[in-house]
Image (tube, rainbow, N blue to C red):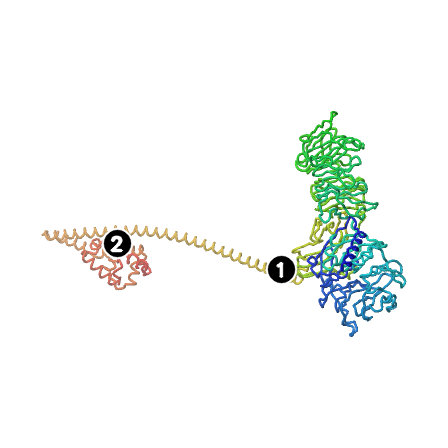
């Protein structure tokens, strides 16, 4: 047991030496099962012509388009072990006791079609289908018990006791049977080419890779790699491959013409070349989720996808950007880097690390490991080469690198940077930026010595030299110039006020670019004008950067300007006729904020400090890598009270161009839409931006952004076309993707609704006409009624006038009556007086007759008495009075006689006297009766007239009209 353990340790050490990794590693993206929301294990991988990936997952067929994952389970919910795309553009899958294929249905959803019914009944029960090979127009499925050959409509069964493997290259198609060894398929038959006896004990093929015409590399689980050529099997061995064989090669794939990727169960993914030499290794240490790789697949852009025992990993193997971890696993931030004496030095928060280099165009592929330079532990700020010496700016002082060790030169203060004062090398004076300002050093006989001359004013981290002037910027306090006088003393000048007009109060960074002293500020970039001794806005740099706030600038040997804005990196590229800005979006928010550093060794080797180690950019390759950028619509959903799926990713079969065939028509109740789109350019996902335009609704394209979905709500009825385009950080745009759809009008906008509207309109017009007619008639009636009212009013006015005239007449008549009454009253009184006078005269005459004795006188007196006593004259006067009284009182006597025929003349007289409102005494004189007689006569008259006691006799007679009726109102 101890011997075995010692052997394993020795073997591991040997492999570590042979499989020494490259200093640069590509980005590895982990997709856990929580991300893709499916099973843990992924057994097989393939890719369609449109770039979409498919994984054989424990829970079904898993697809990925760069943004969205989708799972398609098998009908029996079993594990999918294998997947392949056939010549008929169907996705064939093998599960447990199930074979079939997925193809899109009418709305673009992948739908499963089982082929099990085509298998002869006696062979329909089988276990896992581990391999699928699509060859010509046939599809082969391998389970342990049988190989099923599907030829379009029939399935032919090739049984065996234990089929162990099946695989193919362009030139050959082989399988392994436990008892018969290796066989090749020829003319619908399996022909043995290497029997079981010719194979090592327990030999199990895991992959077959092309090696040339009629030859192939065969990988085995435990026995390494073999070269198969013309029915012969030869071990393909090297010291490294022997060690790798112990890791169990579970799968393999071809990356390019010179490199293969091996998937192991214990050491992750190992890259080898055609000679069997290890190139790189990717394991948990390098960033994989685990070391058990079940499947491996290089996509069409030569990046690697690993199906793991738990999860899926993506290795951006063909990316021009690699990650360098000098102090793994500490992963300290990178602050400075330099190539010196064929070594790469990287300064980190944990110290200075070095790795040896050898000649290679892309230094990230140099194999080696980093070592800590002795006496550099701690924060290293800067690496500078001055006069052929490598100098370290350390938190604890100034040090010089000599071999594997750093020598302390000055530990009195922390140092930021070092620069030669003159452009002629070796420079006799060196400038050092320290925590307190500028410090000068002499250089003589290959040694630096302190001049004992300091210019202490502020921390001098940003320093540049131009024409023997030392320029220093402090981000928050301004710009300073330091000059050495002839006596060796420094003079410090601060650029504020007029000399510093426009400089920012927060964020001033000084650099030397294109032989110009420039200051990057929050207000733009300023240049130093030597003639005016002022900093002025730079029109040149404004034309490059516009309003972008830049805080770091670095010029590379090709004249390109690398710059940092915000937390992003970019470069002004001068390789074309016009300067072009390229954004390195992969490094967004990964730089050391405030301490950015770019070291451009050459066009193929750009080193950029990051929060974790360093990035290496092969800028020449970065510009050459122009994979086709295409945008695809992945899902379209119409939303209303419930959602309706319009499109789910496929217009045609998977390998065919995904061009829309039919335009869906959607009911108006689903007039809100959600669209999902993506670009299957997996290594550039962080660089891709999208813009949308809905034809028929939008007025312009949307702003570029990295959102892969778009919503439109409450669209009116009509025809629309969603146009989507993408672009990368190089400025390349994809072709415009177009998806058309139509929203049907609501029921109230359909033709029959419009017909109803027309009928309603006509009916409405008719009703309006009728209403207008009725209104006119009503107006006419109102007019006529008004006219009638006016006529009636006029008539009333006339009647009123007539009444007034009548009233006036009545008043006149009444006045006349009153006048006549007065006259009659006067006449009556006159008669009364006359009667009284006659009575007195008669009385006197009677007395005289009594006293006169003379006959003649007596006769004369008697004659006179007889004359005074004659009633005829009185009767004539009464008749005359009656006539006038009736005229004045509307035939009062006539009416009274008609109603009361039993009235005596004296009673009529009494009625007249009462109507005239004469007093009782006056009536007694006129009637020649006493007052008592008048009262008795009145009482008798009331009884005859049958007047109630409560009614006044005078009022009754006064209101008695000529028509014989009394006024009831007055009576009551």
Q: Is residue 53 shown above or below 565?
A: below
The kind of secondary structure element at disc 1 is helix
Q: Quadrant of residue 664?
A: bottom right
Residue 761 — which label?
1
Count residues near mark 2 (Cα–Cα under 10 Å), then give few for <14, some for 14-19, many for 20+: some
Residue 505 vs residue 476, the one in the foreground: 476
Q: Quadrant of residue 30?
A: bottom right
Where is the N terminus found, in terms of image quarters? bottom right
Residue 270 vs residue 957, the one in the foreground: 270
- Distance between the alpha carbons at the discs numbered 2 and 1: 84 Å
Residue drawn at point x = 69 percent, y = 33 percent: 437
The residue beneath circle 2 is 917
Residue 181 is at least partly visible in this image? yes
Q: On the rendered structure, is 712 left or right of 798?
A: right
Q: Is residue 602 shown above or below 840?
A: above
Q: On the rendered structure, is 732 left or right of 642?
A: right
Q: Position of residue 466 (x, y in %)?
A: 76, 32
Q: Position of residue 227 (x, y in %)?
A: 87, 60
Q: Is residue 405 shown above or below 853?
A: above
Residue 655 is at least partly visible in this image? no
């Amino acid at each position: 047991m101890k011997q075995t353990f010692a052997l394993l340790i020795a073997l591991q050490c040997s492999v570590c030496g042979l499989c020494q990794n490259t200093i640069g590693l590509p980005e590895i993206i982990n997709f856990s099962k929580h991300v893709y929301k499916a099973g843990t294990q992924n057994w097989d991988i393939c890719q369609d012509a449109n770039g979409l990936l498919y994984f054989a997952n424990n829970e079904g067929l898993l697809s990925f388009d760069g943004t969205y994952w989708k799972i398609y389970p098998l009908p029996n919910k079993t594990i999918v072990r294998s997947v392949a795309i056939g010549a008929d553009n169907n996705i064939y899958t093998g599960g447990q006791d199930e074979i079939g294929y997925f193809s899109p249905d009418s709305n673009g959803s992948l739908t499963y079609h089982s082929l099990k019914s085509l298998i002869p009944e006696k062979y329909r029960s089988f276990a896992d289908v581990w391999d699928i090979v699509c060859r010509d127009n046939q599809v082969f499925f391998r389970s342990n018990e049988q190989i099923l050959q599907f030829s379009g409509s029939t399935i032919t069964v090739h049984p065996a006791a234990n089929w162990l493997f099946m695989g193919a290259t362009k030139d050959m198609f082989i399988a392994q049977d436990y008892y018969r060894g290796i066989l090749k398929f020829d003319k619908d038959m399996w022909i043995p080419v290497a029997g079981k006896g010719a194979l090592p004990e327990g030999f199990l093929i895991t992959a077959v890779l092309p090696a040339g015409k009629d030859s192939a590399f065969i990988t085995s689980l435990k026995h390494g790699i073999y070269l198969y050529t013309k029915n012969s099997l030869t071990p393909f061995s090297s010291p490294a491959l022997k060690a790798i064989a112990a890791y169990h090669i579970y799968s393999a794939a071809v990356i390019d013409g010179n490199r293969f990727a091996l998937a192991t169960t214990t050491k992750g993914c190992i890259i080898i070349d055609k000679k069997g030499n290890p190139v790189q290794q990717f394991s948990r240490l390098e960033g994989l989720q685990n070391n058990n790789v079940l499947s491996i697949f290089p996509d069409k852009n030569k990046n690697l996808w690993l199906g793991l025992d738990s999860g899926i990993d993506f290795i951006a193997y063909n990316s021009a950007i690699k990650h360098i971890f000098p102090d793994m696993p500490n992963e300290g931030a990178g602050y400075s880097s330099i190539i010196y004496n064929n070594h790469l030095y990287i300064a980190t928060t944990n110290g200075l690390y070095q790795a040896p280099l050898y000649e290679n165009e892309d230094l990230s592929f140099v194999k080696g490991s980093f070592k800590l330079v002795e006496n550099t532990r701690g924060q290293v700020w800067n690496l500078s080469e001055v006069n052929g010496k490598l100098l370290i700016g350390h938190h604890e002082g100034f040090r010089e690198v000599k071999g594997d060790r750093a020598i302390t030169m000055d530990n009195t203060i922390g140092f930021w940077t070092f620069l030669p004062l003159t452009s002629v090398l070796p420079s006799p004076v060196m400038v050092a930026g320290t925590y307190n300002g500028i410090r000068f050093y002499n250089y003589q006989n290959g040694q630096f010595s302190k001049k004992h001359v300091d210019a202490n004013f502020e921390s001098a981290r940003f320093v540049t030299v131009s024409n023997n002037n030392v320029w220093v910027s402090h981000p928050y306090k301004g710009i300073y110039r330091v000059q050495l006088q002839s006596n060796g003393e420094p003079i410090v000048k601060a650029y504020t006020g007029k000399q510093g007009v426009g400089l920012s109060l927060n964020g001033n960074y000084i650099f030397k670019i294109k032989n110009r002293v420039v200051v990057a500020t929050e207000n733009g970039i300023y240049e130093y004008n030597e003639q005016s001794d002022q900093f002025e806005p730079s029109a040149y740099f404004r034309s490059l950067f516009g309003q972008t706030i830049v805080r770091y600038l670095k010029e590379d040997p090709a004249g390109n300007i690398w710059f940092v804005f915000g937390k992003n990196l970019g470069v002004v590229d001068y390789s074309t006729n016009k300067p072009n800005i390229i954004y390195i979006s992969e490094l967004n928010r990964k730089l050391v904020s405030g301490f950015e550093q770019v070291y451009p060794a050459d066009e193929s080797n750009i080193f950029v400090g990051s929060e974790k180690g360093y990035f290496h950019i092969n800028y020449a390759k970065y510009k050459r890598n122009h994979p086709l950028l295409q945008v695809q619509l992945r899902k379209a959903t119409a939303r209303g009270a419930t959602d309706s799926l319009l499109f789910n990713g496929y217009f045609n079969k998977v390998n065919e161009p995904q061009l829309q065939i039919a335009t869906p028509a959607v009911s108006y109740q689903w007039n809100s839409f959600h669209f999902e789109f993506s670009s299957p350019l997996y290594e550039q996902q962080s660089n891709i931006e999208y813009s949308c335009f809905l034809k028929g609704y939008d007025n312009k394209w949307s702003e570029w952004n990295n959102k892969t979905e778009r919503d439109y709500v409450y669209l009116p009825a009509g025809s629309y076309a969603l146009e989507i385009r993408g672009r990368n950080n190089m400025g390349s745009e994809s072709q415009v993707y177009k998806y058309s759809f139509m929203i049907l009008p609501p029921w109230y906008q359909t033709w029959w609704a419009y017909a109803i509207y027309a009928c309603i309109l006509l009916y409405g017009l008719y009703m309006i006409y009728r209403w207008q007619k009725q209104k006119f008639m009503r107006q006419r009636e109102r007019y006529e009624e008004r006219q009638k009212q006016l006529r009636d009013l006029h008539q009333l006015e006339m009647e009123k006038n007539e009444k007034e005239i009548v009233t006036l007449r009545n008043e006149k008549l009444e006045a006349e009556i009153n006048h006549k009454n007065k006259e009659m009253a006067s006449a009556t009184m006159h008669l009364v007086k006359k009667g009284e006078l006659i009575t007195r005269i008669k009385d006197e005459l009677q007395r005289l007759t009594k006293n006169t004795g003379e006959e003649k006188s007596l006769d004369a007196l008697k004659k006179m008495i007889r004359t005074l006593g004659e009633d005829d004259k009185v009767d004539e006067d009464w008749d005359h009075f009656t006539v006038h009284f009736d005229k004045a009182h509307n035939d009062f006597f006539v009416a009274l006689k008609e109603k009361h025929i039993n009235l005596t003349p004296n009673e009529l007289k009494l009625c007249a006297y009462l109507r005239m409102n004469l007093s009782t005494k006056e009536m007694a004189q006129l009637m020649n009766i006493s007052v008592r007689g008048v009262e008795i006569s009145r009482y008798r008259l009331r009884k005859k007239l049958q007047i109630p006691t409560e009614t006044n006799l005078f009022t009754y007679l006064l209101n008695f009209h000529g028509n014989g009726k009394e006024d009831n109102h007055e009576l009551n």
